[in-house]
Amino acid sequence: MARGQNGDHLSRPPLVEAIAFDPVLSRTKIVADCWSPLDMSYMEIQFPHWKAWAEMNMRFCSDVRNFLRGEGLLSNLATRLCGSGDLFSSRGPAFSFNFVTKNVGLPLVDLVSFSTAELASELSWNCGDEGPTNNNTVLETRLKQIRNFLFVLFVSLGVPVLNMGDECGYSTGGSPLYDDRKPINWDSLGTGFSKQITKFIAYLGSLRIPRGDIFQSKHFLKVENIVWFGSNQSEPKWDDPTCKFLALALKSEKNFDMSNSNCGDLFICFNASNNLETVVLPEQPEGNVWLRLVDTSLAFPGIFSNSCDPNVQKAEGSSSYELKPHSCALFEATVD
């Protein structure tokens, strides 16, 4: 759609422009996915959006993959968490369709299971063993990484996009090629893996719904409503590749029209290192406490009780929390 008859990229593709200004289509969700139909590779182009087209955010995918395997920059992760203002400054975060896997490349379970030299462009990490394994430590890390990917997807500004089949452990055996994709066996939805992942996805989605002031706003967050933290409560070292911990406190937007007026501040932390991180929770006014809503290090049922209801944990203000290696956590402030 964005190429001319000679294969060159057009600054004003006729069909793209016509859709953007069509009286009916322009009022719908129109999403561009900039991939080459020739070799199924991602194309880094400036898509002519006319403030009508949303886009699949490939930079989100790359930066999140890099960070969670311990090789990304804190600055890149922060940009993606806040709605990718470098890409969508003129449109807003609602036009960023965030994803970590899609119908091209490695599916989610393979992303944490294969990382040969041939897969370098996939930015994957096998968590210690290549391919199928019986090593319980590796298997636990892989499940934790899957939860991490889903967690980052749902706590980032923008629209979270899930890849069909990831919820039931669909695998291509480590092949990123589109031609190697086979029909999904939907009977696998009954497996233990699928049950815990689908429940985790549903829970993450339920956390976004009442927090429209943060996660579903059409506008970027105000600078004064964000406080960033590095390791040991220090200033983040944004461009130091050895730094693998980032946390942020998000102040609730009091003027936002929310059905649940009791929504408080949020505190989110990400640990992509091999080491335990002692996190000091920000102080809250007297009478307020932090509730831990998510900790991806907890094996299933983890944050769920035996009855499969969310099992939150109370933490006093200014208390510390032990965040395990390769884990993420979410806290919400509430009145005790």
Image: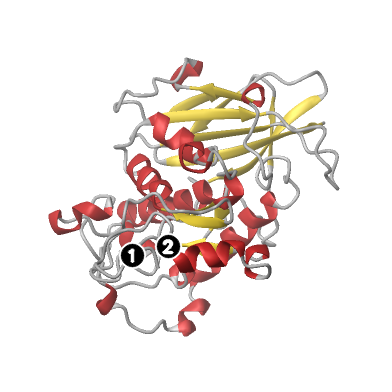
- 291 lies left or right of 29: right
Q: Nearer the viewer, residue 7 or 333?
A: 7
In percent of width and height, residue 301 lies at: 57, 57
Q: Residues within 10 Å of mark 1 (few under 14, many from 20)?
A: some
Q: Position of residue 293 (x, y in %)?
A: 65, 43
Local crowd at mark 2 within 10 Å, few (<14), some, or many (≥20)?
A: some
181 shown above or below 297: below
Q: Quadrant of the N terminus?
A: bottom left
Q: Residue at x 40, y 41 (%)?
A: 326
Q: Say which residue label 1 marks.
A: 3
Determine the image quadrant of residue 252.
Answer: top right
Report if residue 167 is visible in the image.
Answer: yes
Name which residue lies at 63% across and 61% down. 202
Secondary structure found at label 2: loop
Task: Give coordinates of residue 93: x percent, y percent.
Answer: 58, 45
| Res 196 seen here | no
